[in-house]
Image: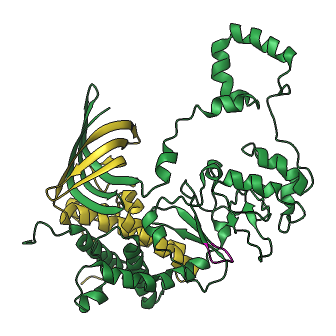
Chain colours: A green, B yellow
Amino acid sequence: MASSANSNPVPKLYRSVIEDVINDVRELFLDEGVDEQILQDLKTLWESKLMQSKAVEGFHSEEQTLHAQPHQHAPQAQVQAHTQQVVLPSTHQAPQQQVIMQDPKVLQHMTVTGMSAAATAATLALPTGVGPYQQLITTNQGQILQVMRAPNGAQYILQPQQQVVLQQMQPGGVQAPVIQQVLTPLQGGIPQQTGVIIQPQQIVLAGNKVAQNTQVMQATAMTAQASQGAVQIQPQQQAAPPQAQTQQPQQQQAPAQQPPPMMLQVDGAGDTSSEEDEEEEDEYDEDEDEDKDKDGGEDGQVEEEPLNSGDDVSDEEGQELFDTENVVVCQYDKIHRSKNKWKFHLKDGIMNLNGRDYVFSKAIGDAEW
Amino acid sequence: MRPGRPAKLPVFSKDALRFASFAAIMAYQLYRNTTLGNSLQESLDELIQSQQITPQLALQVLLQFDKAINTALANRVRNRVNFRGSLNTYRFCDNVWTFVLNDVEFREVTDLVKVDKVKIVACDGKNTGSNAAE
C-alpha cells in the first residue's frame, strides 16, 4: 500500500474486520431464519458503539464516506447524538436483575464520579426530557456503568470496579447477589426517595443526599429517618443476615427496621478487649507472635480489622478515578529474562492506551523488574 | 454399470483433511476484550435483550469475530512498536503471560505514547489458531 506514513491503520482494519464478520455471519443468520435487517442492525450498533468510544480516530461509517466528509470529529459528534438515541432505549430495557456483581469490594470502591471509561461516560449525555430511571450500560471496557437519572435532572454514573459476571438470577434464592445502586439527590420539593445501596437482596431506601462513597451513602442512608425507609425492602432481607462484608451500616440499619441479627461471627466470642483478655493475649502474643501475625487476618476480630485493613496494597484506587485501563492484548513470540531485565517479543496486538486504540504486528519491549 | 456396487467415497488428501480440521479449530478469544470486541459483544447483548437473536447465534458471531480478527491482525497489519518501562508484576499461567508495567513509553515511527500503567496480556503466539484461550 502506498499510503502515507501518517495514516492510521486502525480504522481501516476495524472496518475490514466488521465487513468480514458481517459477511461471514450472514449465512448463519439466514440459517437461523433471522432477518437481514437484524444483521444490519448489528452492524449499525457495532459501528455506533465504536464511534462512541472515541477509541478510534477517524472512524466513520460507510454512509458518511458517501458524503465525502473528512475524518474529523465533527461527523463523530453529529453521529453521537444520533446513535445515543439508538443505544439508550435498548439498554434501557435491560433488566437490572441480570447484572450481578459478585465481588463485595465493589461496594467499597464505587464512587459516583469515578469512571474508568471516561470516553464512553462522557458521551452519555442523556436527553433531559427523560424521567428518572436507571440504566445499565456496558462500556467498551466490559464494565457496567449504571447511569442514574435523578428527578432533578442530574445524572450520576456509577461505575463498578470489577467486571460483571453474568447471570445467575435465582428467583427468590437466598444468595443471589444482586447489587444495584439507586441514587437520587434529596431536594426540597421532591418526595424523599431512594438512597439505596444494595447488598445481596437488600434494597434499603432512605432519603438523603447523594454521597460519593457508597459506604458513606450507606451510613447516611441509615441515619436518615427510619420512618422513611423500607418501602421496597424485600422480606428476605430481614431473614438473611447481612454478609460479613457489611460494617456500620448494618448496625445502623437497626432503627430502620427490625434490628437485624448481628454479623455472623465464626471465630468465637471474646471480641471486645477487656483487661483480662488483653493480659492473656499479651502472654499469648509473646510466645506465638509470628503465628498471631499470620492469623491476624483470620481472627476477624473487630479490633484487628483496622489493623489489618491497611495491609492491602491496592493501586486500584489511584487508577480508577481516571480513564481507561491501558491494555495490550497480543501474542508472545518470546519472553526473555536475565536477572531482572526482561525482554518482550510480542506480535499481533491491539492496544488501548489513554483511551485510544492502536495495533501492531510486532512489538519489542524492555523492562526492569 | 453393475447395480449394487457401492459408491466410492471421495478420498481426501492428508493436507485437505488437516485444512478442514484446522478451520474448525477455534481462534484465540483473546481479542474479545478490546474496543472492537466489546462493542460487538454489547451490540449482540442488545439484540439478545430485544430477542432479535438467540444467544447461540450471538456466540457463533463471536466465534466468527475471533477468526476474523486473528486473521486480520496476522495479515493486514504491518507495523512495529517498541516500548520500554518498568515491570511491576508478571504472571505466567496456562501459557498466558500477564504483565503490568509502569511508566511505559510506546514508540512507533510516527509517535510516542506514554502511560503510567499498562497491562499486557499475551497468549502463546507459536501455534496460533490451535487454542481457544483468552
Give the magenta-colored segment's residue range: A149-154
Hey, which quadrant is residue A25 in on the image? bottom left
Hey, which quadrant is residue A152 in on the image? bottom right
Question: Quick check: B45 left or right of A176?
Answer: left
Hey, which quadrant is residue B110 in on the image? bottom left
Residue B31 point in image, percent of width and height: 36, 60
Quadrant, the C terminus of chain B: bottom left
Residue A99 point in image, percent of width and height: 63, 64
- When the figure is inspected, residue B42 is found, relative to residue A273, above or below; the finding is below
From the image, give the main secondary structure of the stretch colored magenta.
Answer: loop
Viewer can see residue B58: no
Residue B104 point in image, percent of width and height: 29, 45
Q: Which residue reaches farthest front?
A: A188
Query: Foreground: A181 or A25?
Result: A181
Residue at x-position 76% and y-position 46%: A243
Query: Foreground: A311 or A362?
Result: A311
Residue at x-position 9% and y-position 71%: A1
Residue at x-position 66% and y-position 82%: A131
Q: Which residue reaches farthest right?
A: A258
Residue A144 point in image, percent of width and height: 55, 64
Question: Quick check: A10 left or right of A212?
Answer: left
- When the figure is inspected, residue B37 is found, relative to residue A337, above or below; the finding is below
Residue A153 in the magenta stretch? The answer is yes
Residue A124 in the magenta stretch? The answer is no
Viewer can see residue A229: yes
Residue at x-position 61% and y-position 75%: A94
Query: Foreground: B132 or A301?
Result: A301
Question: Quick check: A362 left or right of B91?
Answer: left
Q: Which residue reaches farthest left?
A: A2
